[in-house]
Amino acid sequence: MKNFFTKIVLFATFNVIILNSQAQNSVTVTVYPLPTITLGSNPSVCSGTTTADLTYSATTQTPTTYSINFNAAAETEGFSDVADVALPVSPISITVPAAAAAGTYNATLTVKNANTCVSISYNISVTINTIPGAATIVANSRCGTGPVVMTAGIGANGNQVEFSEDGGTTTDGTDNSSPYEYTTSSITAGSTKTIHVRTVNTVTGCTGAWTNSAVATANTIPTADAGTSPGDITCTDPTRTLSGSGGGSYAWSTADGNITAGAATATPTIDQGGTYSLTVTVSGCASTNSATVVVGESGTIPDVATISANSRCGTGTVIMTAGIGANGNQVEFSEDAGTTTNGTDNSSPYVYTTSSITAGSTKIIHVRTVNTVTGCASAWTNSAVATANVIPTVTISSDGDICNGISTNLNFTLTGTANWTVKYDDGTTVTTINNIASSPHVISVTPGSTTTYTLTEVSDANCTNTNP
């Protein structure tokens, strides 16, 4: 009679199905535990990275290989399954397609040992994060030695801007909030530093490239030099030219002098004594202390004189009255526009009697102010007309003798300038005829007896003749 005996040796708790086993005497079936692996966090990489490291901390049952099975979505992006690859020391390197879009890609991982036992399937994922966009930066400058504040713009998908003074080899500063600013190290006046920037995502660890840069400049502060005094303002040198230096642009100013031209140049023209200040500016930097130059003034040119028109009746001289200009003590008069000085007056009222002027003619009298102490004189700027007006005349006639009770005309023939006034005497009464507009002028009279009409005076617009 045959004996049937089954012996089961269990090394661990597993679900095992034993089929009937028949041995002549006895048989042993060994059941091996499944291998296990303790995985770390699912890896996260930046777009363009071609490997992702999946860490693990422990295994059981000595697995020697691993397999990864990506789902369909991952395989569409280029992920490839791996099977029975030798299990390395942590981490497991997962190949990431360089062109894969940002996103999270899922797979399962199993490990197998030398007994060909395969572990359960572990769910894993690989996350590809977007690379932040390029940061921007704006150039800036300062005057003199010192740091320069640079302002950047952050790129998309970032939360921090990094700044570098050596092209990205070293990160010299960061800013996590807008405006994204960085204060450079001290820059020597006349020098520059090129500041590079990149965008960082501190959550994903992804960084943009050091693509953009801008120049930080420390401009040299110029030194203003207003030069030396060009000499006093005098009668013979009524203007002077200053000579400044030290800048790209110039700005002269004065509180007590006068700049006639070139205030924004190195060489302005002045016509008054005073203190003149120069500020020079180069690349937006102005000298901190304006240079000054003092110009004296000796022999100030007097202001111009004034004169009023005057006239007379008939041939003869005309008295002209002038007003003296400031800084003078004498008025000069000229009948030929200044070629000849025909008269002077040193006290007010400043008067001049012209040479004789023929009736019906004029002379133009020019005046200027003179300072007899300094020898300076104004120009012959102003003038006025001296006029000798024609004396008016009048003659009288009648239409002839008349009979008693009859009227006759008196005829007045006039010379001069309208309107006229005529006075005549009939032996009893002096009669005045006003506002005669034209010559001859006729009036009607009816004398009661023989009467003599005698002219006593005639006046026109300019003169009066008391002996017509």
Image (cartoon, rainbow, N blue to C red):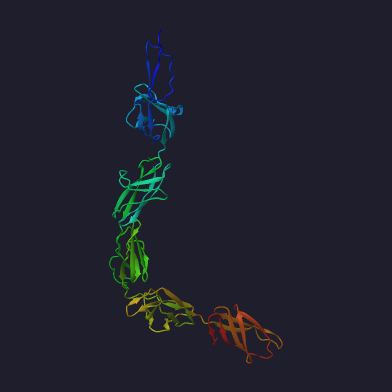
In the image, farthest residue toward the bottom: 428
As displayed, is residue 430 above or below residue 188? below
Q: Is residue 191 visible?
A: yes
* Residue 240 placement, left or right of 388: left
Q: Residue at x 31, y 49 (%)?
A: 193
Residue beneath the point at 41% across and 84% down: 348
Q: Is residue 289 above or below residue 311?
A: above
Which image quadrant is residue 323 in? bottom left
Q: Nearer the viewer, residue 81 or 360?
A: 81
Looking at this view, name the residue that lies furthest to the front: 1
Q: Is residue 77 visible?
A: no
Residue 234's spot in the image, x, y percent?
A: 32, 73
Instruction: Give above or below for 160 relative to 382.
Output: above
Find residue 43 and report its horizontal and vertical position in percent.
39, 34
Q: Residue at x 43, y 75 (%)?
A: 383
Q: Position of residue 296 (x, y in %)?
A: 31, 73
- Taking depth in this image into account, of 302 and 92 the one nearest to the observer is 92
Placement of the C terminus among the 4 image quadrants: bottom right
The image shows residue 448, relative to residue 373, as above or below, that is below
Q: What is the residue that sits farthest to the top in this orientation?
A: 1
Q: Quadrant of the N terminus?
A: top left
